Amino acid sequence: MTTPQEELLPGTRRALLHRIAVAQAEGRAPSLVATVVRGGATVWSGARTSVEGQSPDENVQYRIGSITKTFTAVLVLRLRDEGVLDLGDPLEKHLPGTGAGAATVAELLAHSGGLAAEPPGPWWERTPGSLRPELADVLGEQPLVHPVGRRFHYSNPGYALLGALVERVRGASWEDVLRREVLEPLGLSRTSVRPSAPHAGGWAVHPWADVMLPEPAEDLGRMAPAGQLWSTASDLGRFASFLAHGDERVLSAQSLREMRTPAAAVEAADVAGGYAYCLGMEIRHQDGRTLVGHSGSLPGFLACLAISVEDDVAAVVLANCTSGPLVTAVAADLVRIVAEAEPRIPAPWKPLREADPAVLDLVGQWYWGTHTFALRLSGDGLVSLGPLSGNGRRSRFRSNGDGTWTGLEGYYAGELLKPVRRPDGSVSHLDLGSFVFTRRPYDETAPVPGGVDPEGWRGIG
């Protein structure tokens, strides 16, 4: 479903058009098309082209390169959710004999499996996949260039292995599984392994002259799960909405939150740049905003999908040139323009229908040593614990149904919050992973580790 573009203010629409016009002109792109999605619907699309009277629209296919990896990752997470495999399983358990079987499924998804960045032999993106008919041709004689699990090292062959894993477990080709389990349920009818008209041609633009050279569009064969797909701005907008909100026919919102969580150790430069890799998705911190998604490139094409989950705004940018416009920056700017000009309207506050008195007995001020914390109960039934002021450890907690709570994020993710009661039923303290939270600083009536000096608080005399 597409909502009218008039839903955005005229000034916002002009700012979006100006941004892609600058990108196309300064980046010398033969064409550039972009879409913005808000609240699960397309609210703006625009395009610029060097060919008068032939401007592409959001339904023209471009090659999307490594955004393909996010589609492959969705297929793998589906297998996990079905109980067919565990992300901690070594590849060897499900796909034996590759020579890279010590890497786990999660490590391959996060590019921390130690594999080389590219397959051996001629440049795989500009040569036919028939040159690499077997996985051994993709991996080479020495697949590993780093110890397994030690560092983030982007690996295209790693996603070829994940595609082969999907094929082995499903007993069907990666292309067929992708179409049946993701593309058709999400209505991505213009996303395909091979181009379908209307589609853009890929071009190389000369770095020192305003002339162009056509790029080959090869079928990548075994490397297809790493970068084969063609898609449109419209289809990728729908895919972005799915990645932000989930769809139980394909993958739950909870599994997609896991996909959007950093999963690989990065180098200092990446930390400084605000970049990390998740499970088939990239995460970037830019201008105070967290963006998740993926970028992609193949000879003749550039692509980026960026989502601000907090703002509920996503942007897709596609161009048909080998280099030129910085599509990741353009996509980030499109998200920022909409999020800042027309900020998200929060849902109305609503009280809980009912509250457990035992939980209400826990809310309020608590002390960890002399640090002041507040425990709050929110309308979604979760409790949150965080510093009363300033920065510090904070987390939301989900009820386990037995009076205990499990942390959902941050330092306390997975940790157990347990209210400890006295014989008369009153709350003595909170136990959080061995930390004791009391109603008063170092409450002498609670079992504070190390005990409390019996003479109590005092001045210096």
Image (cartoon, grey):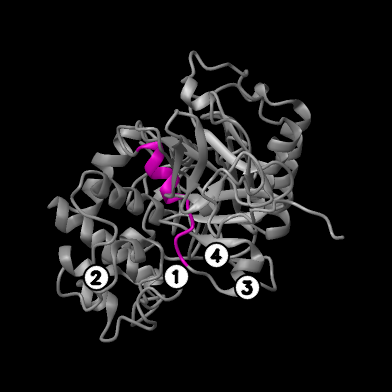
Residue type indicated by callout 2: Ser
Image coordinates of residue 292 in percent, x first then y, are 54, 50
Q: How many marks?
A: 4
Does residue 391 appear anywhere in the picture?
A: yes
**Residue 348 vs residue 65, the one in the foreground:** 348
Can you identify the residue that label 4 sits on?
Answer: 322
Q: Which mark is residue 154?
A: 1
Q: Give the magenta-colored segment's residue range.
A: 252-264
Q: CA distance from mark 4 to mark 3?
A: 25 Å
The local secondary structure at tag 4 comes to: loop
Q: Residue at x 15, y 54 (%)?
A: 169
**In contact (CB < 8 Å): disc 1 and disc 2:** no
Q: Which mark is residue 269?
A: 3
Q: Residue at x 66, y 72 (%)?
A: 207
Can you identify the residue that label 2 sits on?
Answer: 130
The local secondary structure at tag 1 comes to: loop
**In contact (CB < 8 Å): disc 1 and disc 4:** no
Q: CA distance from mark 4 to mark 2?
A: 23 Å
Residue type indicated by callout 4: Thr
The part of the image, by quadrant, that contains residue 121 is bottom left
